[in-house]
Amino acid sequence: LDGFVAASQIALGLVNTVGYSSGVQFDIVYADSGCNGEMGTSAAQSLVDSGVWGVVGAACSGASMGANAVLAAAGVPQISYASTSPALSDATAYPGFFRVVPSDAEQGQAMTAVATADGMDNIAVCHMPNDYGAGLADAFVGNMDASHICTQLGYDVETTTDFASAVEAVSNAGCTSVFLVSYAADGAMILEEMATQGVNIPVYGGDGIAEEGLAAGMADTSIVDGVIASKPLAGGSMSEIGQYFASLCSVNADCAGGIYTSEAYDAVTIMGFAAFTALTNPGLDAGMAVMAVGQGWDGASGSLSFMQNGDVPGPGFCIGEFSHDSADGSVSYDCIRYWDAINGITQI
């Protein structure tokens, strides 16, 4: 959460710098979506009541779904920076919804290809039961040969803080690898519990853990060594906007240690420029303004262009591996392979 707020404040600084000469300044009103549909609905209503022009978020897919029902009815456009559930591609069910990350339908294909190429044929799928967790887990399982799935188990991300039984279940089933669909905080707890129980098997994961922030709260950061996780690739070379954000984010502890920060920055800047566009073009529909601004947008997370359903076509995924420096305890996440729908897996 702190990373998202830090990134949004950097974005706010940019849009207000651009708008200053025209006498336009923006404010951000924050609301807690709670990573679930019910709180997402309440948060969206509070934002509509406060008179916002557009909404950035939510992070979790279920919260974005809950929020959309309120926002769409009020004619308020919505851009998520981290909601990846395939269900959100349905523009009829979720009108006025945009996102700057690709659907997990592709990510499931990518990680299935990677696990298969690595010879993982007895895989435990451990995931959150929310829309993101279940969506990516089901996409992975749906693309994998069923005989290669050892077990599939879900856990409640909001209430679970003890993962001993989940890790025991994986161990007792004789699974020889794990595909983990979690966020950084719970992912870290699962990895630490695996280390405690001596369950030393390969760990694969989705984009929820694909940042150095996975190890931020660990007493022993060597635990993440060798973990492989997928992360959407940025399209094209880094733009000036991307360089500007990277520079400011690197010196902000919350931003540098966060996840989806470049995506949060892009969502806020697109929304800000769309609002500015609508203000200078009276009568322009808010959703159309977002669609127009989000065409060929060179952002911090790459080049983005919204499709008719609000999705962005993904250029593929970085298949990254975590490594630990024993000298200073630092952790890095580095791309070792790429995957895209046309070429499959490409080695670096």
Image (spheres, rainbow, N blue to C red):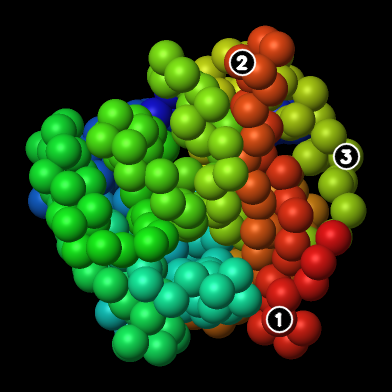
Amino acid type, label 1: Gly
Specify which label sits upstream in the sequence, 2 or 3: 3
Split into 4 quadrants, where in the image is the C terminus? Answer: bottom right
**Residue name at image x 40 percent, y 88 percent:** 145
Secondary structure under the numbered disc 1 in the rendered image? strand
Q: Position of residue 42 (x, y in %)?
A: 14, 44
Placement of 36 over or under 317, stated as above or below: above
Amino acid type, label 2: Gly
User: In this figure, which residue is indicated by the disc labeled 2?
Assistant: 329
Task: Give the numbered dot on residue 240.
Answer: 3
Q: Position of residue 264 (x, y in %)?
A: 54, 41
Q: Decide if residue 156 is on the left or right side of residue 6.
A: left
Q: Residues within 10 Å of mark 2 (few under 14, many from 20)?
A: few
- In the rendered image, is residue 172 in sight? yes
User: In this figure, which residue is indicated by the disc labeled 1?
Assistant: 344
Q: Nearer the viewer, residue 229 or 7?
A: 229
Secondary structure under the numbered disc 3 in the rendered image? helix
Q: Nearer the viewer, mark 2 or mark 3?
A: 2
Q: Position of residue 131 (x, y in %)?
A: 26, 63
- In the rendered image, is residue 67 in sight? no
**Residue name at image x 73 percent, y 65 percent:** 338
Q: Quadrant of residue 265?
A: top right
**Residue name at image x 41 percent, y 44 percent:** 200
**Residue name at image x 66 percent, y 51 percent:** 320
Q: Decide if residue 188 is on the left or right side of residue 242.
A: left
Amino acid type, label 3: Glu
Q: Distance from label 1 to label 3 (Cα)?
A: 30 Å
Q: Distance from label 1 to label 2 (Cα)?
A: 34 Å
